[in-house]
Amino acid sequence: MTERNHTAYLLLGSNLGNRKQQLEEAKINLEREGAAINSYSAYYETEPWQAEGQANYLNQALCINTAADPLELLALTQNIEIKQGRTNKKSNQARTLDIDILLYDNEVMESEQLTIPHPRMHLRNFTLIPLMEIAGEVIHPKLHKSIEELYEMCSDPSEVYLLDEE
């Protein structure tokens, strides 16, 4: 068995179809692809970011262990998105599933395909609030602030609601 020696933080999001089912299926598919889920946040109902007229998103942050390098993890997450019905890759568009790689170990990486840490994570309540639940003390490797500190500094006015579990 391949050693899962890298820690990554992901954000799952969906605003089309059965959103909760999409996120649950994404977690199952990540595990099928060899990721070990260490922890995950509650579900959060969030307003679409810079995209008026769309349905609200359901978001959840995950901490995983993986043997995949960052680009392999990107390919894996994109394949899961497609498998679960995502057809459009444009920013700020409605989608069945979106999986963002927020952090990967303590790496800083910039390529045409992927930027780690996620370049806008510190600007978005819908990212910071779920991530803070599972990784509040984790330090952003580029901004050198904890996730909690980034949330306190964030000026995003959008609302994020903890989803009541029934």
Image (spheres, grey):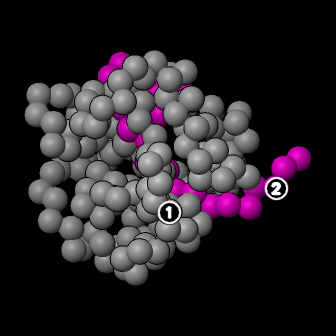
Image quadrant in which you'd find residue 130: bottom left
Image x and y of residue 94, in percent:
27, 27
Q: Nearer the viewer, residue 29 or 103?
A: 103
Image x and y of residue 116, in percent:
46, 60
Structural crowding at the residue carrying mark 1, measured as other residues with C-alpha within 10 Å and reported as few (<14), some (14–19) or many (≥20) = few
The span picked out in magenta is 1-25
Q: Is residue 34 above or below residue 7?
A: above
Image point (50%, 63%), residue name = 109
Image point (46%, 18%), residue name = 85
Judging from the image, what secondary structure is the residue with disc 2 in? Answer: loop
Of marks 1 and 2, the one in the foreground: 1
User: Which numbered tag is attached to residue 3?
Assistant: 2
Residue type at tag 2: Glu
Asked if residue 105 lies left or right of residue 42, the reply is right
Q: Quadrant of the C terminus?
A: top left
User: Which numbered tag is attached to residue 109?
Assistant: 1
Image x and y of residue 59, in percent:
37, 42
